[in-house]
């Protein structure tokens, strides 16, 4: 079996970046919950956040984030990627929030406390994806 190691490295780098981005997003959720709302998540709430965010984030990573950044990579000069990619990633945090709202309708209005927490999660994940993508775009 002839395995294309470049393709394997490309896939693994992006998979690792996706998982890291999501984990940082979860950390941002916890930080905002504690710092802004002075609360902690119950075990059941935390499991719901982890599960639903993964269900929404990872498919959207494949169908939205990855294609957008592949397209941007061709159109943005390498010297500007570190500025543009995190900004685009943060703005794209609205996409999973809207998708999650469409799935469960539990998020309510766009600026409810719950939506603020989810926006912190997805925007932070988008920033990390953007920074990471700027670094690995031409290296893998």
Image: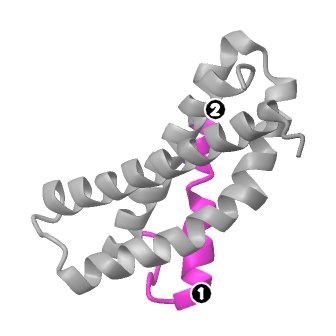
Residue at the disc numbered 2? 133
Residue 62: horizontal and vertical position, in percent? 73, 58
Q: Residue at x 56, y 77 (%)?
A: 100
Is disc 1 surrounded by few (<14), some (14 to 19) or many (20+) residues within 10 Å?
A: few
Q: Is residue 90 magenta?
A: yes
* Residue 61 visible in the current orientation: yes
Q: Is residue 12 above or below residue 85?
A: below
Q: Is residue 60 above or below residue 6?
A: below
* Residue 112 visible in the current orientation: no
Instruction: Find the residue positioned furthest to the left.
Output: 38
Residue 130: horizontal and vertical position, in percent? 59, 35
Q: Is residue 123 above or below residue 9?
A: below
Residue at the disc numbered 1? 103
The segment highlighted magenta reads 87-111
Is residue 104 toward the left or the right of residue 10 in the image?
Answer: left
SS under mark 2? helix
Q: Residue at x 48, y 47 (%)?
A: 21
Q: Residue at x 30, y 53 (%)?
A: 27
Is residue 34 toward the left or the right of residue 107 in the image?
Answer: left
SS under mark 1? helix
| Mark positioned earlier in the residue sequence (1 or 2) | 1
Image quarter of the C terminus: top right
Residue 82: horizontal and vertical position, in percent? 59, 21
Q: Residue at x 51, y 40 (%)?
A: 127
Q: Which marked residue is nearer to the observer: mark 1 or mark 2?
A: 2
| In front of the other: 113 or 66 | 66
Numbered marks: total: 2
Q: Is residue 106 magenta?
A: yes
Residue 94: horizontal and vertical position, in percent? 58, 60
Q: Give the dominant element type of the magenta stretch: helix, strand or loop.
A: helix
Residue 26 location, quadrant: bottom left
**How far apart, in angstroms, are the residues tagged by discs 1 and 2?**
28 Å
């Amino acid at each position: 079996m002839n395995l294309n190691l470049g393709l394997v490295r490309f896939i693994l780098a992006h998979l690792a970046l996706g998982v890291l981005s999501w984990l940082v997003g979860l950390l941002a959720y916890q930080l905002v919950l504690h710092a802004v709302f002075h609360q902690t998540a119950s075990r059941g709430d935390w499991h719901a956040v982890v599960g639903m965010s993964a269900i929404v984030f990872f498919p959207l990573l494949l169908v939205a984030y990855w294609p957008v950044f592949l397209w941007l990579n061709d159109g943005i000069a390498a010297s500007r990627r570190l500025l543009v990619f995190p900004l685009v990633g943060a703005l794209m945090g609205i996409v999973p929030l809207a998708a999650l709202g469409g799935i469960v309708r539990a998020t309510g209005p766009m600026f409810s406390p719950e939506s603020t927490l989810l926006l912190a999660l997805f925007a932070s994940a988008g920033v990390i994806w953007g920074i990471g993508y700027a670094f690995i775009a031409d290296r893998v």
